[in-house]
Amino acid sequence: MAHGVAGGASAICRCPHDAGRATLLSRPGHRLRVLASSVPPPAIEGQGVELSVTTRRGRVLPVLKDCSLRVPPGQLWMLLGPNGCGKSTLLKVLAGFLNPSAGTVYINRPCSYVFQNPDHQVVMPTVESDVAFGLGKLNLSLDEVRSRVSQSLDAVGMLSYSQRPIQTLSGGQKQRVAIAGALAEASKVLLLDELTTFLDEYDQMGVIKAVRNSVAAGGEVAALWVTHRLEELKYADGAIYMEDGRTIIQGDVSAISRYIKKKQARYFGHFEL
Ligand SMILES: Nc1ncnc2c1ncn2[C@@H]1O[C@H](COP(=O)(O)OP(=O)(O)OP(=O)(O)O)[C@@H](O)[C@H]1O
């Protein structure tokens, strides 16, 4: 599903509710389960998340029916599933853009959401100024801003592009600048919605490497990446597979890859002549 930028002036949109380290979301009157405090907290956790939308004709449509997931810090996880199964909606609930009708969400903060369309991602005239843009609100010294900008650009392999005008970048390079913006703001969670849909293989690899470097550096950043591309699974530390508004299976990448391939083989088997 294609999205426009819902807010924020750069490649990324900072998730709402950024005051604390983690947020527990629930609507009043719906069930709320407080997560055990003795277990080291995951970076991202959802339990029994449900979400319904009301259509223009007043019909209540369940989009998320039962979603649970857990992503540890310092890891890249991928979220897969057929078109319309609810991946983007789940990502928006995790980001705090949508309130679940039931269930709980726990997410490390700051958290940033990077959108699919690279042309909606970056707004400042140069790479360096775009990455620095989000730091304006943090009251940092000029030296600190410079250091954060160059470290984040380095993490995504874009340091040598600092002075480049934004409009001269490829789609994947813009995505990497977006990710650098999130890292410069010390985001602990990256929610990434189908970043590679519009990219060629070269740009796709550049973005994957950038995200892998981001989670590897310091071991604190977690990334949840929505994708349709099964071949991207090999770069993940874990995966979650969704169907019809539910998380069906999650954990080991090779097990999930086998699960999806088996499903695809059964599906395509119906069409064999
Ligand atoms: N506001 C809404 N009103 C009506 N239907 C909605 C609304 N938001 C989501 N849906 C429906 O919920 C389902 C899940 O949508 P979502 O975009 O989360 O799926 P997705 O798995 O990300 O799909 P894709 O892989 O095609 O991007 C779809 O059938 C979509 O049409």
Image (tube, helix red, strand yellow):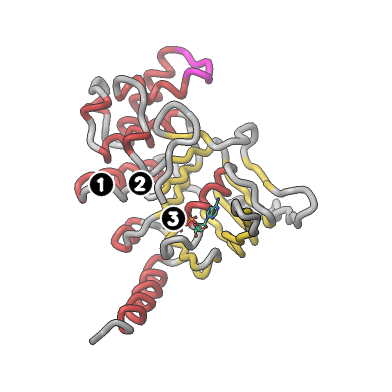
Q: Kindly indicate whether the residue at mark 1 contacts the one at mark 3 (C-beta within 8 angstroms).
A: no
Q: Kindly indicate whether the residue at mark 2 contacts the one at mark 1 (C-beta within 8 angstroms).
A: yes
At label 2, counting other C-alpha atoms closer than 10 Å, the crowd grade (few under 14, some 14-19, many 20 or more) is: many
Q: Amino acid at mark 2?
A: Leu
In the picture, the quarter occupied by the C terminus is bottom left
Q: What's drawn in magenta, residue-wise?
A: 136-141
Foreground pick, 4 / 155 = 4
| SS at badge 3 | strand
Task: Name the residue tied to disc 3.
Answer: 77
Q: Is residue 144 above or below residue 82?
A: above
- Given the current orientation, which residue lies at the most extreme right position? 29
Give the quadrant of residue 46: bottom right
Q: Residue at x 27, y 28 (%)?
A: 159
Q: Amino acid at mark 3?
A: Trp
- From the top left corner, tell me how far across and down residue 40 is, in percent: 61, 51
Tell me if 67 is positioned left or right of 216 in this view.
right
Q: Residue at x 47, y 45 (%)?
A: 191
At label 3, counting other C-alpha atoms closer than 10 Å, the crowd grade (few under 14, some 14-19, many 20 or more) is: many
Ligand 1 neighbours mark 2 (CB distance < 8 Å): no
Task: Name the residue tied to disc 1.
Answer: 199
> Residue 220 lies in magenta, yes or no?
no
> Residue 139 lies in magenta, yes or no?
yes
Q: Earlier in the sequence, mark 2 or mark 3?
A: 3
- How many numbered marks, from 0 up? 3
Task: Name the residue tied to disc 2.
Answer: 195
Q: Amino acid at mark 1?
A: Leu
